[in-house]
Image: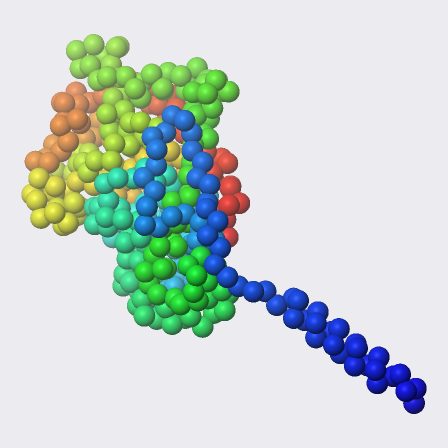
Amino acid sequence: MNKFFPFFLLMIVILIASCERDEVEVVKFDGTPYIFVYPENFDDPELPTDNVLTIEGVKLGKMLFYEKSLSKDGTQACATCHLQKTGFSDENQFSTGVDGFFGKRQAMPIFNMAWHKTGFFWDGRANTLREQSLKPIQDPLEMHETLENVVSKLSKNKTFTDQFTRAFGTPEVNSHKVSLALEQFMMTIVSFDSKYDQYLAGKSTLTDSEERGRNLFFGEYNPFFPDQSGADCAHCHSGPNFHNGEFMNNGLDKDADFKDFGREQVTNLASDRATFLMPSLRNVAQTAPYMHDGRFKTLEEVVDHYNAGVKMSSTVSPLIAPTIAKGLMLSAQDKTDLVNFLKTLSDQKFLTNPAYAQ
């Protein structure tokens, strides 16, 4: 045997071992800030000062948003009922949980949460986005899992413990960190590049029908001069996000027909009975079905409700009540124009943005 052979063999072994050591990633905390971008016509966002957005924190939140082990049987994630193509809402009237039970309300869209100031869910029962993020996990009608089990499952998954280290500095998993990461990711889901936004920026034009619809949307209701009357939408759906952040009764039912007491279940105030959070109209063409109970399948049905279907009740909004007697007096063409304008609020870049996709 060549006397140099053992030496060469030893060198090869050392070289291979050295390469293997070089390939082992050293997982460590990375607090690189996430750059939050938004348009000039938006107010400054209310980002949490005690949960500063970081690139790795947002990444962890996205991983958790799509992680099915957060549910009891590993079949559902947050994204199961909040689909990007539908504005992170559910295309079904009521979501189906892991045990086959239906939820009680339509799943709300998720976007522009950084400008959300009045509580989360239709009834506002969660004060913060981090608080909201944990409730569906524990809800028996939804993911029906305990936070203890979630922590246990994630703690056994090296991919997640490594990402917790990058995001928070240690591999320790707890429910608070889970909520913070989910909050970070959902805060970054933004929509502000619809055709209407481009129109406002002078980069697009509206069709004649869309322009008529725009005038109807922002026009004041005038029962005395129908030809000059608008649909009066902007009182409830105002500002860059097309919502006023209020809890309101929009005349869906009479008192005797109330099946869901809405905000009253949180505040115990009779004045809040059957009031619900006014949603944003951004991407509204994608977020059907509509209302807290998903009773309307199309935008045409929604417009018909406001045109001639609003019902009087003890808590109906004073912004809507004046229209009950005569309705909005919209013609068939008016209704078509209004729907066409609402469709200009769709943001195709948001609906397909890979930054939000799994």
Please indicate, yes or no, whether residue 256 appears anywhere in the rendered image. no
Going 47% across and 69% down the picture, which residue do you hit? 157
Q: Is residue 162 left or right of residue 178?
A: right
Q: Does residue 266 appear left or right of residue 153 in this picture? A: left
Foreground of the two, 53 or 147: 53
Q: Position of residue 255 (x, y in %)?
A: 9, 40
Mark count:
0
Residue for point 37% across, 59% down: 178
Return the x and y of residue 80 as percentages of the image width and height: 41, 55
Which corner quadrant of the image does residue 285 belong to? Answer: top left
Task: Tell me, yes or no, if residue 5 can be seen here.
Answer: yes
**Closer to the camera in the image, 301 or 76:** 76
Q: Is the N terminus in the top left, top right, bottom left or bottom right quadrant? A: bottom right
Above or below residue 221? Residue 312 is below
Residue 313 picture location, percent across and down? 10, 35
> Relative to residue 72, is residue 246 depicted above or below?
above
Q: Residue placed at 87% from the left, 84% from the top?
A: 5
What residue lies at 32% left-to-right and 60% top-to-bottom?
176
Q: Nearer the viewer, residue 22 or 314?
A: 22
Foreground pick, 156 / 89:
156
Work out whether 188 lies above or below 303: below
Give the image location of residue 28, x and y in percent.
50, 61
Residue that sits furthest to the right in the current view: 2
Give the colour scheme of this rendering.
rainbow
